[in-house]
Structure formats: C-alpha cells, structure tokens
C-alpha cells in the first residue's frame, strides 16, 4: 500500500538546515505546585534535578518563588517542570499543559522550516527568561496536531553542570 | 528559605528500587493522522523514525492502518506518535493528548513506588500491544498533577535497530 503523501508532503523541499541540540518535554503545573511536582518525580521515578530558574515571589501570599523551569534528568533524557503562569494559560489544555523544548543555535531557521512544513508561529523570538532553563532566546510554534514546540537557544550554562 | 516539604514528603522512605531504561514522551493525534504527524516531525524537525507498530485497518473506510505507536529519534531523545484510539479517549485533554513512557524491567515495582509517592494506578498490567513501541507489558499511573506515565517492559526488539 502506498504511504499517504500527507498534507505536508509538498513542503519537504524547503532548503533550510536546522540542527537541534536537545529535546525536552516541559510539564506545566498549577502554581505554586511545581516544587511539589519536582519532589514527586524525584521520589517516584528517581529523577535528578540539574537546573532551576526561578522568579521572586510575585504575590505577597505566595510562600514559594515562581519556578520558571526546573530541569530533571531521567533515564538518560531531560524534562522540565514549570509553574503555570497567568500568561501561559493560553496553552492550557484541560487539566494538563505541556510543550516540547528544542534547543538550536538558529531559532529563526527552525521557525522558518517548521512553518514551511505546516506549523503556525505564535509570536516572535523573545527573551527566554528561563522558559527552557537558561535559554536566552525562545520562540513558539504550534504544529498541525495542536502540540506546542518551543525553539530555544542552547542552555550552555545549565549544560556545563550536567553529566552526560 | 526552607524548601517546602511537599505533599509527598512523607513517602520518601519507600524502599523500592526501580531502574528506568528510557523515557519517551508519547503524542496522541486524532486517527488516522499519526502518519501525517510523523511526516511533519521528519520534515519540520529532521526526526528519524526507528520503529512503527500498527494494527490492520479496523474500519472499511480507513485507508491507513492504525498506528499504535511510531518511534522517532530527535536530538538524541526518543518520542512516540500514536493514533488516538477510541479506548484511549479517556486520557484526552482538550486538543492534545500525551503521556510519558518509562521503560523498566520491573513494571510492578515502578507502580508500587509511584503510588507510594502519590500517583494513582489506572488499571493493572496489560499486554503492551505496541503501546510503547514493542513493549510486551504496560501499565499506567496518573501523577498528582494530572500527567499520565506508562511503565513499559523494555522494547528490546526496537532497541536492537536503534543507533545510540
């Protein structure tokens, strides 16, 4: 049986070269429970935290700083856990929210290639502010299946402390 | 500032040793679009497919076999793409559905440890039927933050063809 060409089949000729350095799923939890969630992943699965980016508490009644992202190692892979901020609520899907972070040296080229293949860019390139743990520049696309991908500049500062 | 003990702090003494061989996010897309999605991830991100588990088409009007899971390599990590079947609709959260697959030799011990830490087991251990690409046994827990984790026996048959 011939494989279906697919809605994106015609876009394969886009001559943009992009190299990704890492792939990190990012789990968003209702603030301020990211700290609890990190503790759970350590306890339940033996995950090891290798990086944490926080903002000072933004409301007087918050006991914990807002976790922009905490980076965990598990079974040779990396994932992130973040407090869901008010301005990330637009990505909320039911009870769970998540995104995939792809580190690359060329964020713009990654967007160009993804959009040519059928993704939709969501805003421009912005200051990372820790979204993908230490990435300086971040931009977001939504793929044709509703999943959110964040292209981030390499998080070299974090990486320096992470053992392979 | 003292770190919050967290709702699971008391469970850290559970003496169950579990080792995970791999961590694979799994993206569920509306059937039969998994094939298109795989093509998109290849075109947009340069992902490489290393394994595909299918079921014969189950309805006369389906042109494509149902993709139980297709395994993709991207930036040194692995993820899965699956057609969303009717019986997995219970995990549906808005427009996107996903789970994390954790491969382990001891599925039962993984459940025990996760439940002790605060997760909720969802059914018993069942035949994998390709859910995590070639895993023979699979069971599912939901963590306290709503995310679904599938503990799977190692997918050795797939792994044999995957280069590190």
Image (cartoon, coloured by chain):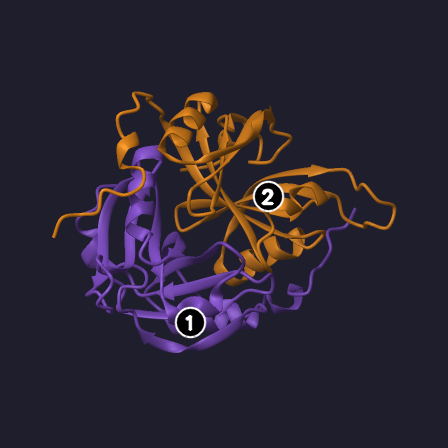
Chain colours: A purple, B orange
Q: Are marks 2 and 1 in contact (CB under 8 Å)?
A: no
Q: Residue B76: x and y, percent?
A: 39, 46
Label disc, if present, on residue B92 of the rendered structure = none
In the displayed image of the protein, which residue is found farthest to the front? Answer: A61
Q: CA distance from mark 2 to mark 1?
A: 26 Å
Q: Residue at 42% across / 27% down in the picture? A: B110
Residue, x 34% and y 59% (percent of image)?
A31
* SS at mark 1 in the image: helix
Image mark for residue A109? 1
In the image, is residue A103 above or below residue B119? below
Q: Is residue B59 left or right of residue A107?
A: right
Q: Nearer the viewer, residue B46 or B145?
A: B145
**Same chain assignment for discs 2 and 1:** no
- Between B126 and A157, the one nearer to me in the picture: B126
Task: Point out residue A60 in the picture as x, y percentages from the top left corner.
Answer: 21, 67
Q: Is residue B135 visible?
A: no
- Residue at x-position 23% and y-position 54%: A52
Q: Chain of mark 1?
A: A
In the displayed structure image, the side of residue A8 where residue B155 appears, left or right:
left
Look at the picture and state if B76 lies above or below A4: above
Q: Is A162 displayed left or right of B155 in the figure?
A: left
* Residue A7 visible in this rendered orientation of the protein: yes
Which is nearer the eye, B96 or A32?
A: A32
Residue B71 locus on image (x, y percent): 54, 42
Residue A127: give x, y in percent of width and height: 29, 74
Q: Residue at x 76, y 48 (%)?
A: B64
Q: Chain of mark 2?
A: B
Q: Secondary structure at mark 2?
A: strand
Which residue has dot 2 on it? B70
Q: For residue A26, what is the image quadrant?
A: bottom left
Left or right, A50 with reference to B133: left
Q: Is residue B5 above or below residue B128?
A: below
């Amino acid at each position: 049986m011939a494989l279906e060409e697919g809605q994106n089949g015609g876009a394969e000729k886009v001559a943009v070269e992009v190299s990704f350095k890492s792939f990190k799923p990012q789990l968003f939890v209702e603030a301020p429970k990211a700290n609890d969630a990190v503790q759970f992943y350590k306890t339940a699965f033996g995950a090891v935290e290798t990086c944490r980016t926080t903002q000072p508490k933004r409301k007087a009644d918050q006991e914990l700083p807002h976790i922009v992202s905490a980076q965990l190692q598990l079974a040779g892979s990396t994932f992130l856990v973040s407090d869901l901020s008010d301005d990330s609520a637009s990505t909320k899907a039911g009870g769970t929210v998540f995104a995939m972070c792809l580190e690359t040296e060329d964020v713009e080229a990654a967007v160009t290639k993804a959009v040519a293949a059928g993704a939709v860019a969501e805003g421009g390139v912005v200051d990372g502010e820790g979204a993908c743990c230490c990435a300086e520049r971040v931009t977001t696309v939504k793929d044709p299946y509703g999943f959110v991908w964040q292209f981030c500049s390499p998080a070299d500062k974090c990486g320096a402390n992470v053992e392979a």
